[in-house]
Image (cartoon, rainbow, N blue to C red):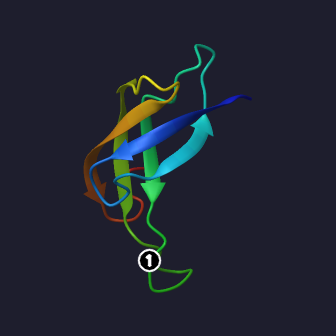
Amino acid sequence: MSEVTVRFVGGPADGLVRQVPAGPDGAPPQRWIMRHPDGTGPSQPGPDHLYERDKPDGLGGWNMRFVRTDAFGVSE
């Protein structure tokens, strides 16, 4: 499976650049859920942050725009 570079725009991951799985067309997934690790322990992980694919960034990667934050598990 190939990967593509994405930049997260807005929300708690603003400015974070990360490799995510690429589809057959070389684009990142339409939606990406980023789990925040700042829970109070393994039984209480932090919230989920939903990002949606935006457009290519002009440098060979893509932008993922922040949509919303949900309590752990709501996005699944």
The location of residue 61, given as percent across then percent down, is 50, 29
Q: Is residue 59 visible?
A: yes
The location of residue 72, given as percent across then percent down, is 40, 65
The residue lying furthest to the right in this view is: 1
What residue is rendered at 44% in x and 79% in y? 39
Instruction: Name the quarter where the N terminus is drawn.
Output: top right
**Side (left or right) of 54 relative to 59:** left
**Vertical side of 31 occupied by 58: above or below:** above
**Vertical side of 4 occupied by 66: above or below:** below
What residue is rendered at 38% in x and 37% in y? 64
What residue is rendered at 52% in x and 85% in y? 41
Q: Nearer the viewer, residue 1 or 18?
A: 18
- In the rendered image, which residue does mark 1 sit on? 38
Label 1 secondary element: loop
**Vertical side of 10 occupied by 55: above or below:** above
Q: Is residue 74 visible?
A: no
Q: Nearer the viewer, residue 27 or 69?
A: 27
Query: What's the amino acid at mark 1?
Result: Asp
**Side (left or right) of 11 relative to 38:** left
Q: Which image quarter: residue 65? A: top left
The location of residue 70, given as percent across then percent down, is 30, 59
The location of residue 28, given as percent across then percent down, is 52, 29
The residue lying furthest to the top in this view is: 25
- Badge count: 1
The residue lying furthest to the front in this view is: 59
**Side (left or right) of 6 relative to 4:** left
Callout 1 environment at 10 Å: few (<14), some (14 to 19), or many (20+)?
few
